Amino acid sequence: MKRNGLPVFTFATALAVVLALPLSAHAQAADLYKAKCAMCHGADGKKAAGHDFTSADVQKKSDADLTAVITDGKAPKMPKYGDKLKPEEIKGLVAYIRTLK
Ligand code: HEC
């Protein structure tokens, strides 16, 4: 009996890790957004004047455009995050902005 316990446990653990990964990446992006972006852009993405993340104007921009603004910033008020966040984190934030539309 003892011998059978281990493989089942290992399989269940591997499955749990695989299932949890995409979820945690999204939760991480949501936390990052709340911590670093929401004070200017609003929790729902609608706050920054003229740059409502839920609008067609922002949503029609490519992932590359949004990534560039987050990475390099935009004068005068949008800070640059290229040196503060990892590329995967910025990618997660772009994906998060897509969920706000
Ligand atoms: C200090 C306030 C501030 C913070 C903090 C901030 N932003 Fe911005 N952001 C702005 C402003 C203002 C603009 C509009 C810039 C412009 O075009 O004049 C902007 C523009 C943008 C745009 C481009 C939207 C468009 O219309 O092209 C994106 C994408 C963006 N911000 C994402 C983020 C993300 C993601 C974070 C958090 C990591 C963040 N911002 C944090 C103020 C801020």
Image: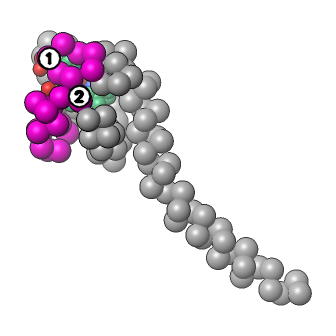
Does 25 appear above or below 47? below
Near-viewer residue (34 or 77): 34
Applied colour scheme: one colour
Residue 86 seen in the current view: no
**Could you tell me if the residues under marks 1 and 2 are in contact, i.e. CB atoms within 8 Å?**
no
Horizontally, is 29 left or right of 9 in the view?
A: left
| Residue 50 marker | 1
Residue 65 on the magenta segment: yes
Q: Identify the image quadrant of residue 77.
A: top left
Task: Name which residue lies at 14% across and 12% down.
Answer: 76
Q: Identify the image quadrant of residue 53.
A: top left
Look at the numbered disc 1 and give the secondary structure of its residue.
loop
Q: Is mark 1 within 8 Å of ligand 1?
A: yes
Q: Amino acid at mark 2?
A: Phe
| Residue 99 marker | none
Mark 2, residue position: 53
Ligand 1's quadrant is top left
Does 89 appear above or below 55? below
Residue 29 on image: x %, y %: 41, 39
Q: Is mark 2 within 8 Å of ligand 1?
A: yes
Does 69 appear above or below 9? above
Task: Name which residue lies at 58% across and 70% down.
Answer: 15
Q: Identify the image quadrant of residue 64.
A: top left
Q: Quadrant of the C terminus?
A: top left
Q: Amino acid at mark 1?
A: Gly
Horizontally, is 58 left or right of 92 in the view?
A: left
Mark 1–mark 2 distance (CA, rounded to whole Å):
9 Å
Look at the numbered disc 2 and give the secondary structure of its residue.
loop
The segment highlighted magenta reads 46-68
Task: Name which residue lies at 34% across and 31% down.
Answer: 84
Near-viewer residue (9 or 101): 101
Circle 2 Cα neighbour tier, 10 Å, few/some/many (<14 / 14–19 / ≥20): many
